[in-house]
Image: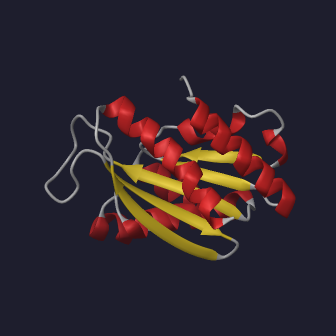
Amino acid sequence: MTLNKTVIDLAEELGKQLLQKGWSISCAESCTGGGIGYAITSISGSSEWFQRGFITYSNEAKKELVGVSEQALIEHGAVSELVVKQMAQGAAKQANAQMAVAVSGVAGPTGGTPDKPVGTVWFGRYVDGNVSAQVKRFEGDRHSVRAQTIEFALQYCLEAL
């Protein structure tokens, strides 16, 4: 995977701010398949503020690794506000981290529906006990959607610091 300068700069800044607070971050990733963790660990010294991430591509992984409820998956689907909130909260809890980011989306080219078209990505964020979520719709092919998701996830975390 090749990271652009913006992603590297965002990951570096995230690390600096987390270190200043004495915090660590975790991530629970579906559509990015570990890309956020890859971006973070591309920064030298990131082990001081990143200990673990979770690739929760399947619904089973979401339930087993970060505690997403079966009910949330059935009623809302994996690409939903409730699920990414549960993913973020679970990732923070499992990693004993003060911050976590979670992503679940439709990277394409298949899998889109009228209410969740290709490019739809939900972001969940856990910050010191508070959980929030945001949805974005990205344009482009699978690679582009995933790259935009990684970049936005890092920005989304920085906004909270």
* Residue drawn at (65%, 35%) of the image: 8
The mark tally for this picture is: 0
Quadrant of res 81: bottom left
Q: Is residue 67 visible?
A: no
* Residue drawn at (74%, 34%) of the image: 43
Which sits in the foreground, 152 or 49? 152
Which sits in the foreground, 124 or 96? 124
* Left or right relative to 159: residue 108: left
Residue 17 x %, y %? 77, 56
Question: Is the image coloured rainbow, by chain, by secondary structure, or in one colour?
Answer: secondary structure
In the rendered image, the vertical position of residue 20 relative to residue 44, given as above or below: below
Q: Is residue 84 visible?
A: yes
* Residue drawn at (66%, 53%) of the image: 26
Residue 90 x %, y %? 59, 63
* Residue drawn at (70%, 72%) of the image: 128
In the rendered image, the vertical position of residue 85 relative to residue 33, given as above or below: below
Residue 35 x %, y %? 54, 36
* Left or right relative to 87: residue 148: left
